[in-house]
Amino acid sequence: MKKHVSMLLAATFMTAPFVSLPTEVSAADYGRQVLAAKDGWASYTGTTGGSTSATAQVYTVTNRKELVNALGGNNTTNGSITTPKIIYVKGTINLSVDDNNNPLGYEQYRDPAYTIEAYVKQYDPATWGKAVPTGTLEDARLRSQKNQAARVVINVGSNITLIGLGTDAKIVGGNLMLKKSTNVIIRNITFQDSYDYFPQWDPTDGSTGNWNSQYDNITLDGATNIWIDHCSFNDGSRPDSMNGTYYGREFQHHDGLLDAKNQADLITVSYNHFSNHGKTNLIGSSDSTTADAGKLRITFHHNYYQNVVERAPRVRYGQIHLYNNYYNNVGNTHYIYSIGVGYQSKIYAQNNYFDMNSGFDAAKLISVLKGTAIYESGTMLNGTSKSFVQAYNSTASTPLSTDVGWTPTLYNTIDPTSNVPTVVKANAGAGKLL
């Protein structure tokens, strides 16, 4: 592992993420930057990441082994580490590799008793029926998935800043897991292709069943005070739309891009680019997780959702401030909806801009999934002011309320909606931090 040797600024920067710094300030100095005051829910009690790290706890990493070592040295226990750290990601880090950085895949993770050919034959609904898969072959699939998870799920502890150097930092082929972590900043990294080689068939998922996979790019599981900024998320060269179908359903190998669950709280998601994906941002994993009530307070602002199918975001319980996001789904033949109004969700949506196919019905920008209310103002659809709430309520048997019981205060400036496409496309995503 290489220690980072460039000089770091002693002062903590408080500039907004899109403000240019003087030319003598290098990309590495962003490791000492903290979230600005009033920049979303993560600023409620402050999010500083690893900004106070001692010099000995500042690292540059170029592969999986170096990343695990920088995070604490043992992937099994790294999630409990609280020592402040700054970790700079240089180049591409593949998480699906052995300790010598040799790629691992289906054959290396596969349990000897499992093959996809046998699995598809065994659990064909035409012969197996609608029961959830059980038995020795399903057990072998689970063992295979656990083999993969042991390598590709990387546990991240608390008081950490993880930041990409330059314009080409990538983490591919795995899942950053923040389980009960607190005070973490992740910036300027492209996250790509968190690929599950062993998806599960669930005949009870929907009317015709679905394939479900295991790994998000980033999972916030009970994590608090998290800032995700200027990152890009996509499926790389293996989008699920290219994987064909089994039993008439898309053979899904990717789960969420950035998901939050189990009382995750006080999170700001800003200036990110989510593209070419299905299930994008799931907030709250189950209607029955009642402990999420009062938690899942998340701000999404100035994010670019491009050619995504659904969940941008899909919300249960949370108080979500959704403002100045740009959605471009022109020509997206797989599109289902953008904003999911789920059980007890409290979404406050302001000045979001949608580019959709000509004649698109504004009511289809949302999907009502047991939710009863959403506040909306300033929405534009294809250059015209539209209200998805009014469009939905015009035909709904049970109209949505616009009273969500709270009003956001943790923001600095909300841009005019007409400016959103230009501002977001110019600034959102990895490589655009400087």
Image (cartoon, grey):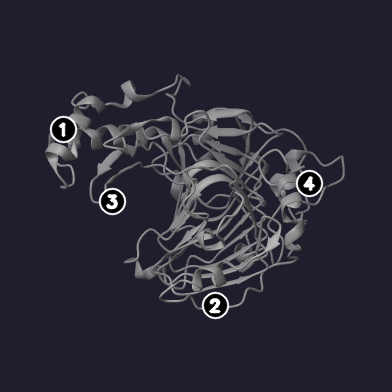
Reading the chain from its start, which is encountered first: label 4 or label 3? 4
Reading the chain from its start, which is encountered first: label 2 or label 1? 1
In three-dimensional space, the C-alpha distance between marks 2 and 3, rounded to whole angstroms, equals 30 Å
In three-dimensional space, the C-alpha distance between marks 4 and 3, rounded to whole angstroms, equals 52 Å
Residue at x 23%, y 51% (from the top left corner): 204
In three-dimensional space, the C-alpha distance between marks 4 and 1, rounded to whole angstroms, equals 60 Å
> Amino acid under label 2?
Thr
Reading the chain from its start, which is encountered first: label 3 or label 1? 1
Residue under label 2: 402
> Amino acid under label 4?
Leu
Residue 121 vertical placement versus 430 (above, below):
above
Left or right placement of residue 325 versus residue 153 in this view: right
Secondary element under disc 1, as helix, strand or loop, is: helix
- For the N terminus, the quadrant is top right
Left or right placement of residue 314 versus residue 418 in this view: left
In three-dimensional space, the C-alpha distance between marks 4 and 2, rounded to whole angstroms, equals 46 Å
Residue 9: mark? 4
Marks 4, 2: nearer the viewer: 2
- Position of residue 324 measured from the top left corner of the image (x, y, whole percent): 68, 59
Residue under label 1: 122
Residue under label 3: 205
- Position of residue 323 measured from the top left corner of the image (x, y, whole percent): 65, 63
Marks 4, 3: nearer the viewer: 3
In three-dimensional space, the C-alpha distance between marks 2 and 1, rounded to whole angstroms, equals 48 Å
- Position of residue 9 measured from the top left corner of the image (x, y, whole percent): 78, 46
> Amino acid under label 3?
Asp
Residue 184 vertical placement versus 241 (above, below):
below
Reading the chain from its start, which is encountered first: label 4 or label 1? 4
